[in-house]
Image (tube, coloured by chain):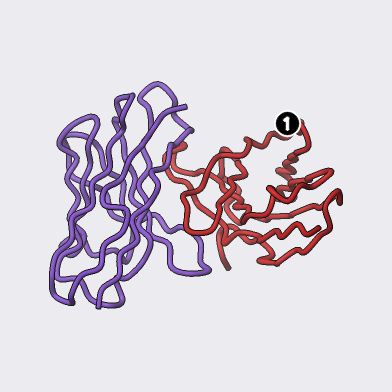
Amino acid sequence: RKEVEQDPGPFNVPEGATVAFNCTYSNSASQSFFWYRQDCRKEPKLLMSVYSSGNEDGRFTAQLNRASQYISLLIRDSKLSDSATYLCVVTTGGGNKLTFGTGTQLKVEL
Amino acid sequence: GAVVSQHPSRVICKSGTSVKIECRSLDFQATTMFWYRQFPKQSLMLMATSNEGSKATYEQGVEKDKFLINHASLTLSTLTVTSAHPEDSSFYICSARRASIVNEQFFGPGTRLTVL
């Protein structure tokens, strides 16, 4: 079983749609949780951290459920520029080691 | 935000040659740097953790004699792929962690290695 599992997609959505991504992780000792965005042939960039209380940054909302070992990302009013691969990331080992999911590809279309 | 650079951004080499990739933190001191590899349509996989002034810690399955890591200063780490083979062709990405911020890593732009 992979440490971090994501549906690879692609998710093809029209502009303005709301889309949700899910992620599960297997290591219950995981300490921190993030969503990164990766554009084609580029490095990943931090989108947002994820907390149990949930957090929102503009059109993006992230949620962590530690009991179910489940992380989600909701994107509202999606834009063409949101097209990218979204990587679910967890840390273990004192926060040193980032473990990446394979990513979920989002394509926002006109 | 913090800036991390990598050089070269792209390299094509013949099988059997060695390739050195540099990772620099431009505006902060990085006590720890990380080297990742990403094959097409796969996730980033941590190869090794590099601490300034000490030997790198390699992940299981990564050959330390093939992937030489040197972290000689607080702003520079190098990865040398020795005797590269076509199966080493990949996207190599480094990240650096600021001494004061444990959980945040800043990624370099990556180096695309193609071994012919």
Q: Position of residue B108 (x, y in %)?
A: 38, 43
For the C terminus of chain B, the image quarter is: bottom left
Where residue A101 sits, quadrant-wise, is: bottom right
A30 versus A23 height, above or below:
above
Chain A pictured colour: red
Most extreme residue toward the top is B100
Q: Position of residue A29 (x, y in %)?
A: 56, 45
Mark 1 — on which chain does it sit? A
In the rendered structure, the answer to whether residue B97 lies left or right of residue A90 reads left
Q: Position of residue B80 (x, y in %)?
A: 18, 56
Q: Residue at x 32, y 70 (%)?
A: B89
What's under tag 1, amino acid-wise? Asp
Q: Position of residue A90 (x, y in %)?
A: 56, 46
Q: Residue at x 57, y 48 (%)?
A: A89
Where residue A30 sits, quadrant-wise, is: top right
Q: The chain drawn purple is chain what?
A: B
Q: Residue at x 31, y 52 (%)?
A: B48
